[in-house]
Structure formats: structure tokens, C-alpha cells
């Protein structure tokens, strides 16, 4: 969830937030760093052996449009998401200094196309307790 910090300035200054997650109404799993830390600490205190995978996401999946709605409420100005065309990603990432943008592009394709998903889907993942709005309030200050 804290990755939204990159979008706060744009939301405040112009209201426009560019999105690589598409379509803008597709819910995606996100998790707060506080939940990651809490769950990691809990797991370290448990007794278990062997191989274990814990799939963690926030209390509910959110869409880019929902992020814009919450930012709008907290900032007090209109905020909207706009999809960045896939064809421009490589040049955008290279202009930001990335030498090999292909892995990031493939990751985004996986989220957007739905082939990156928890093994048990949304129903099979462990849910965090920190809401997106709580994280956004902390980021906005």
C-alpha cells in the first residue's frame, strides 16, 4: 500500500494519478508494511518445520479508482486515475533510469492479466488488518 506514496504529490498538485495497474476498476491485492512486519513477527514465534508459504494481502482488494476516491476524500480535491498505455512503459522506465525494464513490465502484465495470483486465490490468502485509508492518512500526513 505504501507504494501509493509515489502518487501523493501528483494527486495534490494536479489531481491526476497515472496508473500502471489496469483496468482501473480491477481489484488488486495490496498489503500494508505494518501487516507484513506483524505477520513476520508472529511467524517467527510459531513452532513449525519444513517448507511453508504464507500468502498475505490487506483486508480487501482495492482498485486504482478506489485509491483515487480515498485520496480525493483525504486531500480534499478531485483526484482521478489515468491508465498509462502499455506501449509506453519501456521508454518511461528507461527515462527513470531503469536499465532492464522487462521484469517489471512482466510483473505488471501478470497483475493486470490475472496470471499472478495467490495459489488459493483471494479466499486462500491470509488477510492483514490495516486498511488502505489508514496507510494513506499516514502518507499524506
Image (cartoon, rainbow, N blue to C red):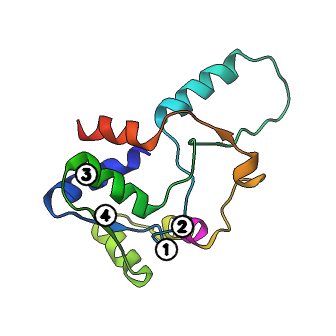
Q: Is residue 95 left or right of residue 24?
A: left
Q: Which residue is mark 2?
A: 26
- Residue 14 sits in which quadrant? bottom left
Q: Residue at x 71, y 44 (%)?
A: 125
Front position in the image: 109 or 95: 109
Which element is circle 2 on? loop
Which element is circle 3 on? helix
Which of discs 2 and 3 lies nearer the camera? The answer is 2
Q: Where residue 83 sits in the image (x, y, percent)?
A: 38, 75
- Quick one: label 2 or label 3, which is nearer the N terminus? 3
Q: Which mark is residue 8?
A: 3
Q: Residue at x 53, y 27 (%)?
A: 37
Q: Residue at x 56, y 72 (%)?
A: 109
Which span is picked out in magenta?
108-112
- Quick one: label 4 or label 2, which is nearer the N terminus? 2
Discs 2, 1 touching: Cβ within 8 Å: yes
Q: Where residue 132 sits in the image (x, y, percent)?
A: 44, 43
- Residue 114 sits in which quadrant? bottom right
Q: Residue at x 18, y 57 (%)?
A: 77
Discs 1, 3 touching: Cβ within 8 Å: no
- Quick one: label 4 or label 1, which is nearer the N terminus? 1
Q: Which mark is residue 23?
A: 1
Q: Is residue 50 above or below residue 100?
A: above
Q: Which residue is mark 4?
A: 97
Q: Where residue 19 sits in the image (x, y, percent)?
A: 38, 67
Front position in the image: 116 or 123: 123
Amino acid at each position: 500500500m505504501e507504494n501509493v506514496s509515489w502518487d501523493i504529490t501528483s494527486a495534490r498538485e494536479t489531481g491526476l494519478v497515472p496508473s500502471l495497474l489496469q483496468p482501473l476498476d480491477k481489484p488488486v491485492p495490496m498489503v500494508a508494511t505494518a501487516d507484513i512486519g506483524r505477520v513476520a513477527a508472529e511467524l517467527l514465534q510459531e513452532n513449525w518445520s519444513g517448507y511453508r508459504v504464507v500468502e498475505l494481502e490487506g483486508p480487501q482488494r482495492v482498485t486504482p479508482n478506489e485509491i483515487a476516491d480515498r485520496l480525493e476524500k483525504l486531500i480534499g480535491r478531485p483526484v482521478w486515475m489515468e491508465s498509462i498505455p502499455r506501449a509506453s512503459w519501456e521508454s518511461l522506465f528507461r527515462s527513470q533510469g531503469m536499465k532492464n525494464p522487462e521484469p517489471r513490465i512482466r510483473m505488471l502484465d501478470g497483475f493486470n492479466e490475472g496470471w499472478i495470483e495467490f495459489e488459493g486465490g483471494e479466499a486462500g490468502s491470509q488477510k492483514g488488518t490495516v486498511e488502505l485509508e489508514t496507510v494513506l492518512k499516514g502518507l499524506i500526513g
